[in-house]
Image: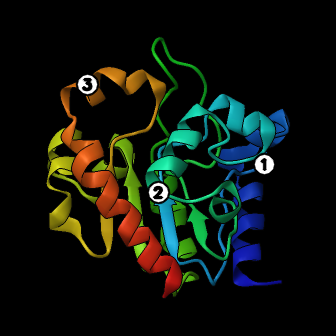
Amino acid sequence: MTNLDRIRAELIADPDNAWAREAGYAPLYTADVAAKVALIGQAPGRKAQESGIPWHDASGVKLRRWLGVTDEEFYDPELFAIVPMDFFYPGKAKSGDLPPRRGVAQKWHPRIFAELPDIRLKVIVGSYAQKYYLPGRPVTETVRAYQDYLPSAIPLVHPSPLNVGWHLRNPWFEQEVVPELQALVAAALKS
């Protein structure tokens, strides 16, 4: 049993996650010691949790396009570690999903990332991950200032279909950030 296997077992057994075990949910993340790129998002959506596959929804399709990778590459744990701010679907809110539970990332991320020595790039997706990893600015300002975080991290707006308005107001994202992201991912995966 590897350290990553032990961490997963402890996460599953954690009393804070008893509700998820009772619902039949498995923690939705991937981590392998060989991973080169870490994707840090908010929490799995309902469709992803039900399928047992991270980013298995319209948001994931868009994210893979932005990254410039195939489904096979994206789901290869030796290439991508997918480590959300919460490992379980938090439930539905009035608009979208509930936020990730507080304290989950603080408790588990340091242990998981300590076992991922080859991470070359952290892709920080959405407001919850940015508040934790890149605090101090609102999402649009953080993403607009993406060069401040290079070469080890790059912030992205969440690829949710609900963010259509944001994309219409911020065409620079697709023109500037996505090509830089694709170049960074390609370089990290080849290293």
Instruction: Locate the N terminus and report the quarter of the image it occupies.
Output: bottom right
Left or right? Give the position of 72 relative to 100: right
Given residues 148 and 137, the one toward you in this image is 148
In the shown orientation, is residue 139 left or right of residue 123? left
Residue 149 or residue 23, whichever sits in front:
149
Q: Quadrant of residue 10?
A: bottom right
Q: Amino acid at mark 2?
A: Leu
The answer to whether residue 26 is left or right of residue 65 is right
Residue at horizontal 15 percent and vertical 65 percent from the top: 148
For numbered disc 2, what is the local secondary structure?
Answer: helix
Q: Earlier in the sequence, mark 1 or mark 3?
A: 1
Distance (Cα) linking label 3 and label 2: 20 Å
- Taking depth in this image into account, of 94 and 72 the one nearest to the observer is 72
Crowdedness of circle 3 by 10 Å Cα count: few (<14), some, many (20+)? few
Q: Secondary structure at mark 3?
A: helix
How many residues crowd around disc 1 within 10 Å: few (fewer than 14), some, or many (20 or more)? some
Task: Identify the residue under disc 3.
Answer: 168
Q: Which residue is found at the position 57% from the left and 72% from the top? A: 112
Q: Where residue 29 sits: x, y (%)?
A: 65, 57
Q: Is residue 64 left or right of residue 138?
A: right
- Neighbour class for label 2 at 10 Å: few (<14), some, many (≥20)? some
Position of residue 56 measured from the top left corner of the image (x, y, whole percent):
68, 41
Counting residues from the start of the chain, the first of labels 2 and 1 encountered is: 1
Q: Is residue 191 above or below residue 111?
A: below
The residue at 64%/83% (across/down) is 33
Quick check: 108 above or below 84?
below
The residue identified by callout 1 is 26
Type of the residue with mark 1: Ala
- Residue 67's mark? 2
Comparing marks 1 and 3, which lies closer to the viewer? 3
Residue type, label 3: Leu
